[in-house]
Amino acid sequence: MQVTVEKTSALQRLLKVKIPGEQLQEKVNSRLKELGKKVKIKGFRPGRIPHKILLQRYGKSVRQEVVSEIVQSSLFEAIEKESLRPASNPVVDELPDMSAGGDIEFTASVEVYPEIESIDPTVINLDQPKTEVTEADVDEMLQTLREQRQTWAEVDGKPSKGNQVALEYVAQTDDGPVPAKGRQRLSIILGASGFDALEKAVSGLSAGESKTTKIKFPDEYGDPQLAGVKVSVELEVKSVQRSELPEIDEEFIKSFAVESGVMDDLRTEVRGNLERELNQATNSFLKTQLVGRLLEVHSDLEVPESIVQKEANNLKNRAAQAQGTKADDLSVEPYMELATRRVKSGLLLAELARQNNIIIDGAKVRKAIETVAETYEKPLEVVQMYYGNQQLLDSVENIVLEEQVVDWVVGKAKIKEQPMSFKDVINAAAAAGQAS
């Protein structure tokens, strides 16, 4: 087999492959011989059918089959021989003539991964959070757990901060009432809704009272007909309720699977969860910085269009699911920039792993899966599901490998400790996740 490689663009290669006719004919004859042992032709016993008869009857189809197989196998052999790193399956530009004799010649295009120069981690500067979980953080989480189990009791009179107000409204716009029929029902908690104008409007009303006033709706309001506009609103308060938080007693503690019902054991459990969350957030915070530094240095890195397109489609599909609409109704274009960034960062982290022989730690993968499984009623079944689904397993392995790369870089980079609170680290990691 003869192979020549032509570089048609930064990441595109054109393979020209030539396979000797003798090799093809040898495979055709061998396939016909095997076929002759199985087929039945009137007047001949199986295994005794003359080659000429087999060639006349099956030669064309066998040759097409063999040529197709040789094209595929020789392509991957050529890719390996030329040490190419394909980013997608090669595409045969034009199939060879399957009926003619002689040598087979064909061309194929293949998109490859970019060649990335050696990355030196010792010149990378990273800020590492200097953080620990405090008793105050545990207290705050316990308060959050209480709020998650809160109940609501009716209140007579006007609402105050922290009260939940259920109301109904009709907004009068230039295009008519919103909603067009009936009234829109809404519940807000005073001091926490972010809708200051509405809070002010209902603060003087008791249950059953109503008023008409002008209100400016927030720019991000869920109804696009009202978002960012100031309109006249007829509203009625249906109920005012105050929050009642449960006591942290034995029953409350046991409801979080702390069988002892002891407060100290609940605090230990909460602290452990917060420390795990802190470790994940710290790694995410460091990874975001590392990716940013790598992208700055490799700002001109070209990445495979096929992978970017696939990632953009994934982002679009997730957005459609979140919005409750069909993916076909959304354009992929708004997601291309983020997809390109994600592909670049993924390639750079993978390249760091490849250049430094960092391989996936199976024990860490298992631990990561078990950590997810612990949040379900039947953790063993969840673990088995992950190991039985290659796509799920790949996703965890990719996360673990990136964490290993970050840990390795932190051990060699220029690190500056940055004092931060638990909440600061969590918020920084969350912000980084939204941006990437």
Image (cartoon, rainbow, N blue to C red):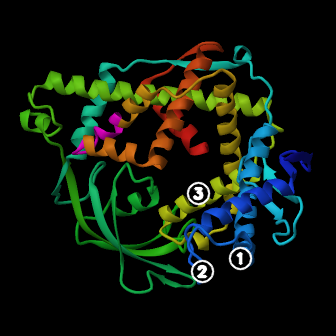
Give coordinates of residue 154: x percent, y percent: 16, 59
Query: Which one is in front, 142 or 27?
Result: 27
Q: Which residues are magenta?
A: 370-379
Residue bearing mark 1: 53
- Give the percent coordinates (x, y) of residue 51: 71, 69
Evaluate if marks 2 and 1 touch, with contact meaning CB atoms under 8 Å apart. Answer: yes
| Residue under label 3 | 314
Q: Nearer the viewer, mark 1 or mark 3?
A: 1
Residue type, mark 2 in image: Ile
First-in-chain label (1 vs 3): 1
Above or below 314: residue 41: below
305 horizontally vs 250: left or right: right
Residue 376 belongs to the span the image colors magenta: yes
**Residue holding disc 2:** 41
- Whether residue 221 appears in magenta in the rendering, the answer is no
Inspect this view and state whether residue 303 appears.
no
